[in-house]
Image (spheres, rainbow, N blue to C red):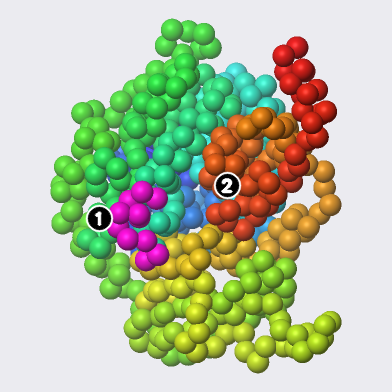
């Protein structure tokens, strides 16, 4: 029998040919990110039965995918598969847990679990620099192909995947981001508007992925998380929560496409039968959640588990040690290698950051990413300090967090993204403009990865283009977004700007400059004669 059981969130138990593959098993009852995230709803099945898989696949390092507590129960002889990326933090942690066989794959390289059971893994770097460390897995289960896209974006060879034929697609349908929730840049009304944009983006991204890949069955999953910390709970509630449920995405899929959809709840099993049979895709529902509805039951679920989970939150936070003396020096040493060894990123960040660190051994500290000053043309003069106490001068970005949380990052217990995803910090930016290179540095914090991104961004490479006609003019436009590789030929044009369908970067028709982030695409207006030819070809 071939089956896929949802373990909650992004977790899957895939059974085929007598073998068991676990994908992203986040099962910890202590949640993730210092107990800020919890599964919604949590898995009610037999965890012990899952602790002896034949293979484990971890898509990336985020703690709602990589759960060291559960993996600690898995025999260390079990092979662990992941994507091959320049940042090796996940591989390092798997080795630290003692796993003997860690297999890194990319470009849909194959790992055979058993005859007729093959896992092919890829990372999203098609037509864009390697800003990402997510991966996806194409599962060949006999004569069926299942694409576990999870959090991965569509910087993949979509046309090839579509031609290969995807039977089942599982893809994220809720955002995993802290913006705009933690930003003091906005009042509550504006924050609500921006959160609605994020919500819509996640729903439409799922539907766009399904339209592009044309699976026979599409399943939204990988969220939403539930927040039991009383300081965060407001983000979970309401029909306009930034974190929609799979049922919302499935309804949108049904409204906009003819693609069959299915909603799974933890413990539900998708049984895959003979191709073409009436019951080829059969749902075996979990009894524990037979009457559960993701949207209707948010409040009831929260109240049922509130007391228990608030105790967990309190225990986890109490276990985080206070910051040790010397925090500023550790903070300074953390940033100096990036400030001194990556002038390309310094140039593209090009501003001062203010960190307001509250609590014991904290303070207000500056990280200065401004380019070197010059006493004369061609004569760089080193700034006296690169990381220093706040001097009262304006900063474009500000971050506020506790000294205990920052020290977890300095000790590498949490990554910067783990700390950000905890939602237990505040941020402010002025001007209100996203800086891709700053958050890439936070995301990677790895010199090898940063050098690879610089190499890709500075390579003299040709770009696929398409012709866009709008406002009575024709433009030759770079086809793929430099941020995440989304196809700009599918973009809308609003107010003289091309709006990327992936993450809503907005590129000016006049010069290709991104107006809401640091980026640019190649674009040129076609001469009148070429415009006439384009229109004639379109009519033909």
Please tell me how crowded label 1 is: few (under 14), some (14-19), or many (20+) other residues with Cα within 10 Å: few
Q: Residue drawn at (30%, 70%), measured in percent from left and top?
A: 317
Corner quadrant of residue 312: bottom left
Please indicate whether residue 443 sits to the left or right of residue 273 in the image.
Answer: right
Corner quadrant of residue 320: bottom left
Among numbered discs 1 and 2, the one appearing first in the sequence: 1
- On residue 159, which mark appears? none
Residue 289 in view (yes/no): no
Query: Whole-percent x and y of residue 267?
Result: 33, 34
Helix, strand or loop at disc 1? helix
Query: Whole-percent x and y of residue 522?
Result: 74, 46
Q: Which is more toward the observer, 469 or 204? A: 469
From mark 1 to mark 2, how far is it between C-alphas? 32 Å
Query: Whole-percent x and y of residue 371?
Result: 69, 77
Q: Residue drawn at (18%, 53%), measured in percent from left and top?
A: 306
Please tell me how crowded label 2 is: few (under 14), some (14-19), or many (20+) other residues with Cα within 10 Å: many
Residue 233 in view (yes/no): yes
What is the tally of numbered marks visible in this picture? 2
Helix, strand or loop at disc 2? strand
Corner quadrant of residue 373: bottom right
Q: Main secondary structure of the magenta part?
A: helix
User: Does the segment drawn in magenta span residue 232?
Assistant: no
Please indicate whether residue 493 sits to the left or right of residue 294 in the image.
Answer: right
Q: Is residue 269 above or below residue 198?
A: above
Q: Is residue 125 above or below residue 314?
A: above
Q: Which is more toward the observer, 6 or 206? A: 206
- On residue 506, which mark appears? 2
The region drawn magenta spans 184-194
Residue that numbered label 1 is attached to: 233
Q: Residue drawn at (69%, 27%), measured in percent from left and top?
A: 160
Q: Which is more toward the observer, 109 or 448? A: 448
């Amino acid at each position: 029998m071939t089956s896929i059981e949802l373990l909650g969130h992004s977790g899957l138990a895939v059974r085929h040919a007598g073998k068991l593959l676990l994908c992203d098993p986040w099962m910890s009852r202590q949640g993730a990110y210092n107990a800020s995230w919890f599964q919604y709803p949590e898995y009610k099945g037999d965890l012990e039965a899952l602790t002896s898989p034949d293979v484990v696949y971890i898509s990336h390092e985020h703690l709602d995918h990589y759960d060291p507590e559960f993996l600690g129960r898995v025999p260390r002889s079990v092979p662990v598969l992941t994507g091959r990326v320049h940042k090796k933090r996940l591989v390092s942690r798997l080795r630290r847990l003692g796993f003997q066989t860690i297999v890194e794959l990319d470009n849909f390289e194959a790992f055979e679990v058993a005859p007729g059971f093959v896992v092919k893994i890829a990372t999203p770097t098609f037509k864009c620099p390697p800003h990402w460390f997510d991966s996806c897995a194409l599962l060949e289960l006999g004569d069926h192909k299942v694409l576990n896209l999870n959090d991965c974006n569509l910087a993949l060879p979509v046309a090839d995947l579509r031609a290969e034929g995807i039977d089942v697609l599982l893809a994220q349908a809720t955002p995993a981001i802290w913006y705009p929730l933690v930003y003091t840049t906005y009042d509550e009304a504006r924050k609500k508007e921006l959160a609605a944009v994020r919500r819509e983006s996640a729903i439409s991204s799922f539907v766009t992925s399904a339209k592009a890949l044309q699976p026979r069955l599409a399943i939204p999953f990988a969220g939403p998380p539930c927040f039991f910390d009383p300081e965060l709970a407001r983000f979970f509630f309401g029909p306009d929560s930034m974190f929609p449920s799979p049922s919302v995405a499935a309804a949108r899929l049904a409204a906009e496409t003819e693609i069959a959809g299915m909603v799974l709840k933890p413990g539900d099993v998708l049984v895959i039968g003979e191709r073409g049979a009436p019951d080829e895709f059969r749902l075996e529902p979990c009894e524990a959640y037979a009457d559960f509805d993701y949207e209707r039951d948010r409040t009831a679920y929260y109240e049922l588990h509130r007391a228990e989970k608030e105790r967990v939150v309190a225990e986890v936070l109490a276990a985080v040690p206070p910051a040790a003396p010397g925090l500023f020096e550790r903070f300074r040493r953390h940033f100096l290698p990036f400030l001194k060894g990556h002038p390309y990123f310094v140039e593209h960040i090009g501003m001062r950051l203010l960190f307001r660190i509250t609590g014991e051994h904290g303070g207000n500290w500056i990280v200065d990413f401004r380019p070197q000053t010059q006493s004369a043309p061609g004569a760089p003069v080193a700034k006296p300090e690169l990381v220093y106490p706040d001097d009262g001068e304006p900063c474009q970005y500000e971050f506020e967090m506790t000294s205990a949380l920052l020290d977890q990052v300095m000790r590498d217990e949490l990554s910067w993204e783990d700390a950000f995803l905890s939602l237990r910090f505040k941020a402010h930016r002025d001007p209100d403009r996203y800086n891709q290179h700053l958050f890439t540095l936070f995301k990677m914090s790895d010199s090898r990865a940063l050098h690879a991104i610089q190499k890709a961004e500075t390579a003299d490479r040709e770009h696929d283009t398409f012709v866009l006609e709008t406002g009575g003019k024709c433009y030759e436009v770079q086809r793929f977004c430099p941020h995440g590789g989304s196809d700009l030929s599918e973009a809308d044009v609003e107010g003289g700007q091309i709006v990327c369908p992936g993450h809503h970067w907005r590129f000016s028709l006049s010069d290709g400059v991104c107006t809401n982030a640091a980026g640019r695409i190649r674009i040129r207006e076609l001469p009148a004669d070429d415009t006439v030819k384009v229109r004639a070809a379109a009519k033909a």
